[in-house]
Amino acid sequence: MRRNPITRRAGFTIVELIIALSLSTVVMIGVLYVYIFVARSYTRTIGFGLPNEPTLESQGRRTLSTLALDVQMTSAITSPSASEITLTVPRPTGGTQNVTYYYNSTVAAVTVYSVSVPATSLVRIDRTTNAVRTMHSSLLTCVFTCYDAYGRPYTTYTDFLIGIKELSLVLTSQTGNSANNTLTRVYQVSSPRLLFRNKSFLP
């Protein structure tokens, strides 16, 4: 009786396995490198230890949107300076209230208007309830500039407070640590000139 020829079973040779393993290693190294790069970039961008902390960019957007809303409703201004301004805005329950934007440029917390202001931060203080809201942290600079009806910036506020018609805000921020390679780039936020629509002024 004639036997069937032995059929050769399909499989991989040792050379093919080595080549496949080498290619897989190269691909995994590439994926790992991209993962490390993205993670490091994310850490540099947020500049905080916890992923749920706001980014510098989102802090800047929130600061400008809140300030723009307050300026739009402002009926009076008091205590303006390059680092502080107090606005009179409507209260949700009726009447008006004063809110102060205050920039603490020091590296330690300070007490102003009976509230604590964190270091290198811009805060919004409700002067009625003394509620403090940190608008932006990790600031390098924060400058308020007021303008008259002709677009001229104020350099002193001893006279003609009623003539203030516009306000702008420019701030820069940076966080992280150069020692562990997490220092972010300097992030700058510049507002347009915000118009006080509800505030009377002198020509």
Image (cartoon, rainbow, N blue to C red):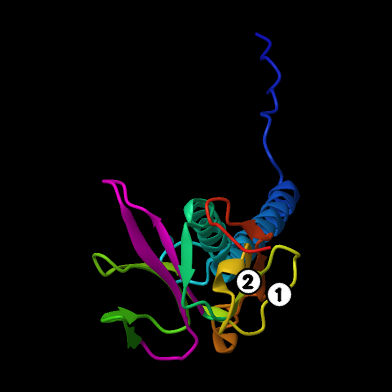
Q: Nearer the viewer, residue 142 or 47?
A: 142
**Residue 94, position in %: x, y?**
29, 47
Q: Amino acid at mark 1?
A: Pro
**Residue 30, position in %: x, y?**
69, 59
Residue at horizontal 71%, vertical 45%? 13
Q: Nearer the viewer, residue 120 or 149?
A: 149
Total tally of numbered discs in the picture: 2
Q: Considering only vertical position in the picture, is 194 above or below 111?
A: above
**Looking at the rendered structure, which numbered label has been put on residue 153?**
1
Q: Considering only vertical position in the picture, is 16 above or below 170?
A: above
- Numbered range of the magenta stretch: 84-109
The magenta stretch spans residue 192: no
Task: Determine contact: label 1, label 2, CB under 8 Å.
Answer: yes
Does residue 40 appear in the picture of this structure? no
Q: Kindly state the secondary structure of the residue where label 2 is placed.
A: strand
Residue at horizontal 63%, vertical 64%? 202
**Looking at the rendered structure, which numbered label has been put on residue 146?**
2
**Residue 71, position in %: x, y?**
52, 57
Picture quarter with the N terminus: top right
Q: Nearer the viewer, residue 33 or 82?
A: 82
Residue 45 lies in quadrant = bottom right
